[in-house]
Image: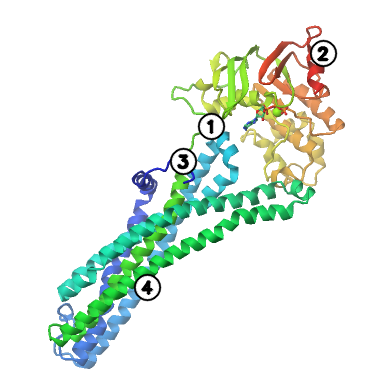
């Protein structure tokens, strides 16, 4: 299985039942409508019996119809009644089917939507570690495809299973009342079917799980390639990427064929078993008619019932194999729900309105998985200080900021904000204290104005414009044909790197957080744009605790302190003004 330890079947069913509970009304409605189909299917073969036994033969009208059709009624009236019954039963059957289909679709879609929403919400809370390891498409696949399993499980799986079981029971009772021996013979095949089903279940489920994992891996290639199409094209790698896709998706062909083979193999066996049962009933029935124990009409009735008795049996058998696909998906969806959130919130977590911005690291160590990246880092920063972090690439600068914003928790040690451990604050309150400007600004496919508003959803248009002005972004935005209402392409690709970065700075101005983190904000832009960005950064860092990471010394005009880390260890810290220190550190850092 894909997720290490599998949750047991019982636990899984209990989980699914809990997910389904809010929709019990719809599901109960579907069950009721399906049950209503049972008496209808009991009526279906009846017109034939009346026609044969009463119209053609000379038996009396069946008891329950006697009040409607007096014994004196002519054969023509009886025949018309039988025909009318046939029509009535058909109309009712289809009306119920219509209602059932509507209710099933409605309940099923509602169910899927809410389950998807839950998975999506969870996927946003998941640790970066989860997405780093599995790729984001894994979660996409689980939300898009695996989430529908709940609907399949309940509405196409369990409910019909129940309804068919009830129909089956009713059919058995009715058949037994007509001819007990026939009922027993008909039922003799049940244990065989049961055995077949448990075999098929065991062989199909693990294959479904593999198939879903393979399908999601194949989609992962598509997702990755389309997101990085420029790189792919620049290296002329389209062919190889297509092959990589086929390599992963190719497994699906053999896998699906295998599953289909197993499923149809079992279908064949089930069909054969049922045919044997029918043949036995036919033989014994004919003997009974010959012996005069059974009327011909009753035999026809029983054969009609038998067809309907075996129909639910067959449906149940099919459902049980199909159910395995749903269960394999449901397992994957539940595994997503069970994965760890990025950073847990303590029950005693305290609220935080606006931090002053005093920060200390106390013996902080951190590892992504097994690889230690930060080693015993300790320092203290007063509120409002502008700190420059220097160090060779891979030294752990970004990692340090990831810990500060609590995207990860330290493996050892503490990070304190205003004297309190980060883990003691409410997570959403804590995140409000930080504004991040990263090397690769991320924009969403909406308008520029909305992209700036992302920092604070209640911001007014004036505030947005003020933030854009502070970020030196207003001029280029105003020149665009639709100004702030200009849509940016997916991930902002219709804007230049410098424009995107200025929008991301505007966000930071709008957010007005007490702590600012700038990670290589100018490394992707030209010198002219850099000057405009640095000017607005100077405005941004005043009166905030700011951390600036920049390889190029030109990227920073003003700072109070310098922190130097190498290989995950703190190798120097001091005021920027102290003689010798900053120059030495800066020279050392930028030499690499
Ligand atoms: N998600 C991750 N999973 C595993 N290892 C990681 C992850 N992110 C970073 N690392 C590793 O951690 C180390 C520190 O990375 P970090 O990004 O903090 O360096 P940096 O100082 O910011 O470098 P740069 O100046 O190039 O941005 C590197 O060796 C990197 O390979
Ligand atoms: Mg970095």
Report the mark closest to the observer, 4 or 3. 3
- State whether residue 166 appears in this view: no
> Sequence-wise, which precedes: disc 1 or disc 3?
3
Q: Residue 592, image x and y in percent?
A: 80, 24
Q: Quadrant of residue 523?
A: top right
Q: Are marks 2 and 3 in contact (CB under 8 Å)?
A: no
Please name the residue shown 64% across and 12% down the image.
379
Placement of 583 over or under 128, stated as above or below:
above
- State whether residue 236 appears in this view: yes
Q: Residue 230, image x and y in percent?
A: 76, 47
> Sequence-wise, which precedes: disc 2 or disc 1?
1
- Mark 2 vs mark 1, CA separation in Å: 39 Å
**Which residue is disc 3 drawn over?**
4
**Which residue is disc 2 drawn over?**
583
Counting other residues with Cα less than 10 Å from the Cα at mark 2, is it few (<14), some (14-19), or many (20 or more)?
A: some
- Disc ID at residue 94: 4
Residue 106 lies left or right of residue 213; in this view the side is left
Ligand 2 is in which quadrant of the figure?
Answer: top right
Report the mark closest to the observer, 2 or 4. 2
**Which residue is disc 1 drawn over?**
342
- Mark 2 vs mark 4, CA separation in Å: 86 Å
Q: Secondary structure at mark 4?
A: helix
Please name the residue shown 42% across and 52% down the image.
327
Q: Secondary structure at mark 3?
A: loop
Q: Secondary structure at mark 1?
A: loop
Counting other residues with Cα less than 10 Å from the Cα at mark 1, is it few (<14), some (14-19), or many (20 or more)?
A: some
Q: Are marks 2 and 1 in contact (CB under 8 Å)?
A: no
């Amino acid at each position: 299985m894909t997720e290490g330890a599998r949750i047991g079947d019982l636990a899984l069913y209990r989980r699914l039942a809990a997910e389904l509970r809010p929709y019990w009304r719809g599901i109960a409605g579907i069950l009721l409508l399906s049950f209503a189909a049972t008496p209808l299917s009991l009526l279906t073969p009846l017109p034939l019996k009346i026609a044969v036994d009463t119209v053609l033969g000379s038996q009396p009208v069946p008891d329950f119809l006697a009040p409607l059709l007096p014994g004196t009624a002519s054969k023509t009236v009886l025949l018309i009644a039988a025909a009318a019954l046939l029509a009535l039963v058909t109309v009712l059957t289809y009306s119920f089917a219509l209602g059932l289909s509507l209710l099933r679709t409605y309940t099923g879609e509602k169910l899927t939507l809410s389950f998807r929403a839950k998975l999506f919400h969870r996927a946003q809370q998941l640790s970066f570690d989860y997405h780093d390891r599995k790729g984001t498409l894994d979660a996409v696949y689980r939300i898009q495809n695996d989430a529908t399993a709940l609907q399949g499980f309940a509405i196409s799986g369990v409910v019909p299973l129940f309804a068919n079981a009830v129909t089956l029971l009713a059919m058995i009772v009715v058949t037994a009342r007509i001819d007990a021996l026939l009922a027993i013979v008909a039922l003799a095949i049940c244990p065989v079917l049961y055995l077949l089903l448990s075999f098929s279940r065991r062989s199909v489920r693990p294959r479904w799980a593999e198939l879903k994992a393979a399908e999601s891996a194949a989609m992962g290639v598509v997702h990755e390639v389309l997101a990085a199409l420029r790189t792919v094209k620049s290296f002329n790698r389209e062919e190889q990427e297509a092959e990589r896709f086929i390599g992963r998706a190719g497994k699906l062909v053999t896998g699906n064929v295998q599953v289909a083979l197993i499923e149809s193999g079992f279908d064949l066996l089930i069909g054969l078993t049922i045919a044997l049962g029918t043949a036995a009933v036919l033989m014994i029935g004919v003997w009974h008619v010959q012996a005069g124990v059974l009327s011909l009409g009753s035999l026809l009735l029983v054969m009609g019932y038998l067809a309907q008795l075996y129909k639910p049996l067959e449906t149940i058998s099919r459902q049980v194999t199909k159910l395995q696909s749903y269960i394999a998906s449901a397992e994957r969806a539940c595994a997503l729900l069970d994965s760890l959130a990025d950073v847990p919130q303590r029950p005693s977590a305290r609220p935080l309105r606006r931090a002053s911005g005093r920060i200390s690291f106390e013996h902080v160590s951190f590892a992504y998985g097994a690889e230690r990246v930060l080693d015993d880092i300790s320092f203290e920063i007063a509120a409002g200080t502008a700190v420059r972090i220097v160090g060779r690439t891979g030294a752990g600068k970004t990692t340090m900021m990831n810990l500060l914003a609590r995207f990860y928790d330290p493996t050892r040690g503490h990070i304190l904000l205003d004297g309190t451990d980060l883990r003691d604050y409410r997570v959403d309150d804590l995140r409000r204290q930080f504004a991040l400007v990263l090397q690769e600004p991320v924009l969403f496919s909406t308008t520029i104005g909305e992209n700036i508003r992302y920092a604070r959803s209640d911001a007014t248009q004036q505030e947005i414009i003020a933030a854009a002005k502070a970020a030196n972004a207003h001029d280029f935005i105003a020149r665009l044909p639709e100004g702030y209402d200009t849509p940016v392409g997916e991930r902002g690709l219709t804007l230049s790197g410098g424009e995107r970065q200025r929008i991301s700075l505007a966000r930071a101005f709008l957010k007005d957080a007490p702590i600012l983190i700038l990670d290589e904000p100018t490394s992707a832009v030209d010198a002219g744009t850099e000057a405009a960005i640095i000017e607005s950064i100077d405005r941004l860092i005043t009166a905030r605790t700011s951390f600036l990471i920049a390889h190029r010394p030109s990227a920073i005009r003003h700072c109070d302190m310098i922190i130097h880390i190498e290989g995950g260890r703190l190798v120097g810290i001091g005021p920027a003004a102290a003689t010798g220190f900053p120059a030495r550190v800066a020279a050392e850092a930028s030499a690499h």
